[in-house]
Image (spheres, helix red, strand yellow):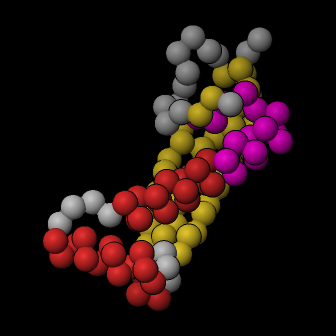
Amino acid sequence: MLMTTTQSVEGKQIADYKGIVCGEAILGANIFKDIFGAIRDIVGGRSGAYEEEMAKARQIAFKEVEEQAMSMGADAVVGIDIDYEVVGANGGMMMVSVSGTAVTFAR
């Protein structure tokens, strides 16, 4: 399934707007990742553990969007917006939210 942040797809004419599709994923970072992340913050550098968690959450959210769009009979999802939030007590969880509009193309 084609998914894009743009409102249109070059060379394609949108025939029907099926509706808004959304996917969310909330993942907690365990205590060891928190400790190693804190150490990285002190000494500098990237936190691979957090990057992996964010990538997992993003993949889950996009998969949900794709499944919803497919169930609507869509050809694509346009206008995708990706949001990242820290949630939970002391920011212990990460949330990725993906939304867009499911569409079909003219044949």
The percent position of residue 42, horizontal first and vertical second, equals 18, 76
Q: Is residue 37 above or below residue 106?
A: below
Seen from the viewer's position, the closer of residues 86 and 105 is 86
Is 80 left or right of 15, judged from the image as shown? left
Q: Is residue 97 visible?
A: no
Dividing the image into 4 quarters, which one contains the N terminus?
A: top right
State the residue at coordinates (62%, 15%). 12
**Quarter residue 71 falls in:** top right
Is 17 left or right of 94, judged from the image as shown? right
State the residue at coordinates (53%, 15%). 10
Seen from the viewer's position, the closer of residues 47 and 17 is 47
The percent position of residue 40, horizontal first and vertical second, equals 25, 70
Q: Is residue 62 magenta?
A: no
Q: Is residue 66 magenta?
A: yes
Seen from the viewer's position, the closer of residues 27 and 73 is 27
Dividing the image into 4 quarters, which one contains the C terminus?
A: top right
The percent position of residue 79, horizontal first and vertical second, equals 54, 38
State the residue at coordinates (27%, 60%). 46
State the residue at coordinates (47%, 88%). 89
Count up the numbered dots. 0
Q: Which residues are magenta?
A: 63-78
Q: Is residue 101 visible?
A: yes
Hey, which residue is sitting farthest bottom in the picture? 89
The percent position of residue 32, horizontal first and vertical second, equals 43, 80
Q: Is residue 69 above or below residue 44?
A: above
Q: Is residue 15 above or below residue 31?
A: above
